Image: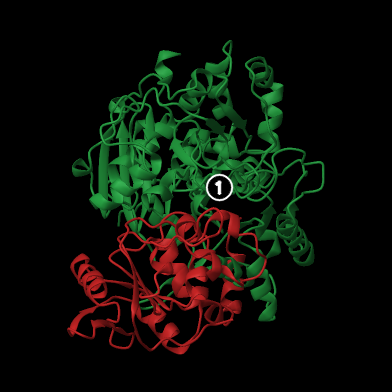
Chain colours: A green, B red
């Protein structure tokens, strides 16, 4: 029988199927960080359980870490507690731990792929919804809650009903200045913030085939923003080339064996999905959001839609625009912006900083802009320096910070102040997401760069 | 750490007729810094509930004493966004045992079930009836019967059934959780793990 890529990977990990219930689902690799794991370890202890496979769990500190002066003691005592809890729990159970200052430290969804933790055909979970990122490699990867973190620690399994299957096809040639982020924001704007809830999404079509691994990670990362549990892209030569030789990737005969399996990982031609969408990639513009969920997005040259034109309740839509201080019919280009943030698990990789540099090179940061450039990991940070991008940034008046989740969720001090408007390459524009009262426009690194040098929301195509 | 049994809940309800309530609203990230599961209810809907100077926003429903009870009724697509289980903890810690909506985000729904808060998904029409009934009379009682999988607006007798899989239903009726189940399977899991290539 014809099956999908998703079925192949999912079914290979089911240990037991419960009648009218979830599957007992085996997890190959488990990522943990300081915010969603401490209570799981407490639960483990209170039940007198042990960590079943410590070698399958990997810890890094990212959500709650400062992005300047990481060599100094962390100031916030609550953050210190969480970082200490992660370190102590990892040490107690023999889990690998890349804490603050470690050369492999960085955002969990950046360091996983960098170190070959992320593999095709694997199941990967983490107490973070953007775990969907790892689907770029043909893995089944999704975010879980803390109770499930405890399940994985104590049993290497979780109990999950199998999601339905959706395929999203995007074909055609992307236009100038249109990046993977724009493709993802476009899809989310079409499906809405809940349009893929209950589904696992396979991305197919030449737009994704032609993307780099980093681009695919950006797309899969944002799957959760339309409600999908995860996204997946069939592995190909690019995937294998990316993975080969990385720290935790299989080596030697194990690599050959893995390759034999990985080459079977694609959707059969006549496999059927529960839902399918097809879009024309050539029609996608650089995208921006104008509201308070990622589904409220549009091409940068469009005006804000009227409440009647959009799906969902009018009151909620108006509440959202009211929070943003925008009005129906407003032109977005030219709106004065206060902050620009490039970073996060969505757009904090080297290609994102190259894109940012391509626009700010030879230009100057606008005076009204506070810019935060936050690499996704120390590896990305080192590459920025090695490739000469730091010199370009410095010349243009930008400073580079140290790795972490930073202003994406503003748990640390990187908070956009009340009422200020930020253009961010991150993943969520929820009310207060980047700090209480902050207002967020989500966009690509190119839009962020164009805005950073002009001081107003700017179409990057005018500067390319 | 399994939770209280959930069988029949009869309570007044707190209405929050807003769509796409994300978990950043339910509990903002800056309140995720605890290393123990305590006190999250104080910060439930923090930025909708309190001004920056910590004075209560009077118009917000949790600050309106006429609305109270163990049932939170939210608009469509409740609990979207971040996977933070802290959102479900905050709902529980505040005193809610059930969230009713016409549509739930997946991870939030799962997190609720894992800690003993029952997510009840009703039709858009029935949700509207609840909002109207509670608005007309905040003393309106709603009964949720997990055994029969029904939700009833007691004053009018209007009733709808809701879905929950048998496994989760048994768990909630008895106060068991998934870890209780999984830790009885260790031998089977270990045998399976040996077959994994990586």
Q: Is residue A258 above or below residue B98?
A: above
Residue A121 in the image: x percent, y percent?
50, 51
**Front position in the image: B83 or A327:** A327
Q: Which residue occupies 57% across, 83% down?
A: B184
Would you call the spot at circle 1 few (<14 residues within 10 Å), some (14-19), or many (20 or more)? many
Question: Which percent across, then down, holds residue A367?
Answer: 57, 20
User: How many numbered discs, if any?
Assistant: 1
> What is the quadrant of the C terminus of chain A in the image?
top left
In the rendered view, would you say B175 is above or below A15?
A: below
Q: Is residue B36 above or below residue A446?
A: below
Nearer the observer, A339 or B180: A339
- Which picture quadrant has residue A400? top right
- Mark 1 secondary-structure assignment: loop
| Figure quadrant of the N terminus of chain A | bottom left
Does residue A24 show up?
no
Q: Residue at x 37, y 24 (%)?
A: A333
Query: Would residue B149 be seen by someone viewing this image from the given angle?
Result: yes
Q: Residue under circle 1?
A: A409
Q: What residue occupies the far right of the structure in this picture?
A: A72
Chain letter of mark 1 equals: A
Query: Measuring 22% from the left and 38% from the top, which residue is drawn there?
Result: A306
Q: Is residue B76 left or right of residue A379?
A: left
Q: Would you identify the image quadrant in which residue A86 lies?
A: bottom right
Q: Position of residue A276 (x, y in %)?
A: 26, 47
Residue placed most toward the observer, A139 or B159:
B159
The residue located at (48%, 38%) in the rendering is A218
Q: Where does residue A335 sit, x and y in percent of width and height?
A: 40, 26
Of B52 and A40, the residue lying toward us: B52
């Amino acid at each position: 029988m014809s099956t999908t890529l998703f079925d192949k990977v999912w079914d290979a990990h089911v240990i037991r199927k419960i009648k009218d219930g979830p599957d007992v689902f085996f997890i190959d690799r488990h990522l943990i960080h300081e915010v969603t794991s401490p209570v799981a370890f407490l639960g483990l202890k209170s039940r007198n359980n042990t960590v079943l496979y410590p070698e399958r769990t990997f810890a890094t500190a990212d959500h709650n870490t400062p992005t300047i002066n990481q060599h100094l003691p962390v100031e916030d005592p609550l953050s210190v507690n969480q970082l200490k809890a992660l370190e102590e729990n990892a040490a107690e159970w023999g889990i690998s731990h890349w804490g603050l200052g470690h050369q492999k430290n960085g955002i969990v969804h950046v360091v996983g792929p960098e170190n070959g933790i992320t593999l095709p055909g694997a199941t990967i979970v983490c107490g973070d919804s953007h775990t969907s990122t790892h689907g770029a490699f043909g893995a089944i990867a999704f975010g879980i809650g803390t109770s499930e973190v405890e399940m994985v620690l104590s049993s290497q399994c979780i109990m999950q009903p199998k999601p339905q299957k959706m395929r999203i096809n995007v074909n055609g040639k992307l236009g100038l200045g249109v990046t993977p982020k724009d493709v993802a924001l476009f899809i989310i704007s079409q499906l809405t913030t809940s349009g893929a809830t209950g589904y696992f999404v396979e991305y197919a079509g030449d737009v994704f085939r032609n993307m780099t691994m980093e681009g695919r990670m950006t797309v899969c990362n944002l799957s959760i923003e339309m409600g999908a549990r995860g996204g997946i892209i069939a592995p190909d030569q690019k995937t294998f080339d990316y993975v080969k030789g990385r720290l935790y990737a299989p080596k030697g005969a194990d690599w050959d064996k893995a390759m034999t399996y990985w080459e079977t990982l694609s959707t059969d031609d006549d496999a059927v999905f529960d839902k399918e969408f097809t879009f024309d990639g050539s029609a996608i513009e650089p995208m921006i959001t104008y509201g308070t969920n990622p589904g409220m997005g549009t091409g940068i040259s469009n005006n804000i839609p009227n409440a009647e034109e959009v799906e969902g309740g009018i009151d909620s839509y108006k509440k959202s625009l009211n929070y943003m201080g925008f009005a129906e019919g407003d032109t977005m280009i030219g709106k004065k912006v206060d902050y620009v943030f490039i970073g996060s698990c969505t757009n904090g990789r080297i290609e994102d900083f190259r894109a940012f540099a391509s626009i700010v090179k030879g230009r100057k940061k606008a005076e009204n802009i506070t810019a935060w450039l936050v690499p996704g990991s120390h590896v990305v940070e080192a590459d920025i320096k090695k490739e000469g991008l730091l010199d370009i940034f410095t010349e243009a008046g930008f400073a580079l910070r140290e790795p972490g989740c930073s202003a994406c969720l503003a748990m640390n001090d990187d908070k956009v102040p009340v009422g200020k408007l930020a253009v961010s390459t991150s993943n969520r524009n929820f009310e207060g997401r980047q700090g209480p009262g902050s207002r967020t426009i989500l966009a690509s690194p190119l839009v962020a760069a164009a805005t950073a040098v002009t001081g107003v929301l700017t179409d990057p195509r005018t500067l390319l | 750490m399994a939770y209280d049994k959930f069988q029949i809940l009869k309570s007044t309800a707190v209405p929050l007729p807003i769509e796409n309530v994300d978990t950043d609203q339910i509990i903002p990230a800056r309140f995720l810094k605890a290393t123990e599961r305590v006190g999250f209810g104080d910060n439930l809907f923090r930025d909708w509930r309190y001004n920056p100077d910590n004075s209560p926003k009077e118009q917000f429903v949790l600050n309106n004493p006429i609305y109270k009870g163990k049932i939170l009724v939210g608009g469509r697509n409740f609990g979207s966004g971040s996977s933070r289980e802290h959102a479900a903890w905050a709902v529980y810690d505040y005193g809610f045992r059930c969230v009713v909506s016409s549509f739930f985000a997946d991870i939030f729904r799962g997190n609720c079930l894992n800690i003993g808060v029952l997510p009840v998904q009703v039709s858009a029409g029935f949700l509207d009836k609840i909002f109207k009934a509670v608005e007309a009379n905040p003393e309106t009682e709603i009964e949720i019967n997990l055994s029969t999988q029904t939700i009833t607006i007691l004053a009018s007798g209007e009733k709808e059934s809701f879905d929950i899989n048998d496994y989760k239903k048994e768990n909630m009726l008895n106060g068991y959780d998934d870890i209780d189940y999984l830790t009885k399977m260790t031998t089977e899991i270990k045998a399976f793990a040996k077959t994994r290539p990586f």
